[in-house]
Image: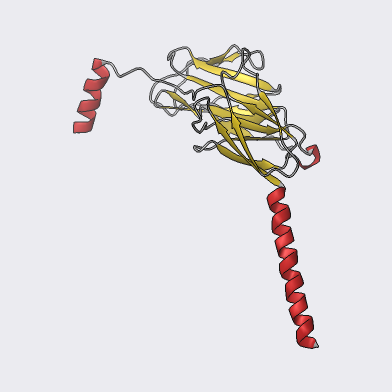
Amino acid sequence: MAKFQIVVAILLAVAAGSSSLNAQAQSSLTVTVTDKNGQPLPQAVVSVVHANEGNADKTTKVAVMDQVNRLFDPFVLVIKQGDTVAFPNSDNIRHQVYSFSQTKPFELPLYSNIEAPELRFEQAGVVVLGCNIHDHMKAYIYVSPYAVSEITDAQGQVTVPAATELSVWYPGLGDQPTDALAVRVKPGQTQLNVQLPVTQQGQNPPPPSALQQRFNRLKNNN
């Protein structure tokens, strides 16, 4: 009788563990975002529209928008309202970062790599960044109005809590910088593919000048 009770207890434990794993799987949603050609789309922002605000992290944080090799890094930065962004300059030349976006218009005077000015972003929206010195430099700060906003990886994938509706954003999705795609999710769905009518964007630095090429050759020979 005792052996029978032990076997039943083990079976119940296994069943409970299996139910727990199934519940955990159903409580998350893996989203794959592709461009109009069906290619994976990194750095798309996927937000849960009706996420539980009570579980949201309400602490403010300091995010980093760096400048490396005359490029903004990252190309898309996701923060929440009230967060602060530091703008270090990891290059050995000066940059002048600015934005004309309604969400947060600003201009940082020319500064070198010994400085890292900080700005607080109180209003939700999209902030388009540029550099007055290097026209090819362009990046985005997504100031999220949602409790949950995540960014897709190199394979265009991201996992978010189970949801009934998502908001998917990527630069150039509409006429306005804040335009996003609303996506309905079926009950119990754990995998979702979203195709956006865009192509992957990025920063395209111009080829180095003849003087820069000569400097690089001398540098590499040393």
In the rendered image, which quarter is residue 204 located in? top left
In the rendered image, residue 154, in percent from the top left (x then y), is placed at: 49, 37
Q: Is residue 207 left or right of residue 171?
A: left
- Give above or below for 79 relative to 56: above
Q: Is residue 161 left or right of residue 69?
A: right
Q: How many marks?
A: 0
The quadrant of the rendering that contains the C terminus is top left
- Give above or below for 3 relative to 164: below
Residue closest to the eye, 193 or 201: 193
In the rendered image, residue 1, in percent from the top left (x then y), is placed at: 81, 88
In the rendered image, residue 98, in percent from the top left (x then y), is placed at: 54, 15
Q: Residue at x 30, y 19 (%)?
A: 208
Q: Residue at x 64, y 17 (%)?
A: 104
Q: Residue at x 72, y 47 (%)?
A: 27
Residue closest to the eye, 149 or 117: 149
Residue closest to the eye, 129 or 200: 200
Q: How is the image coloured?
A: secondary structure
Residue closest to the eye, 9 or 106: 9
In the rendered image, residue 37, in percent from the top left (x then y), is placed at: 49, 26
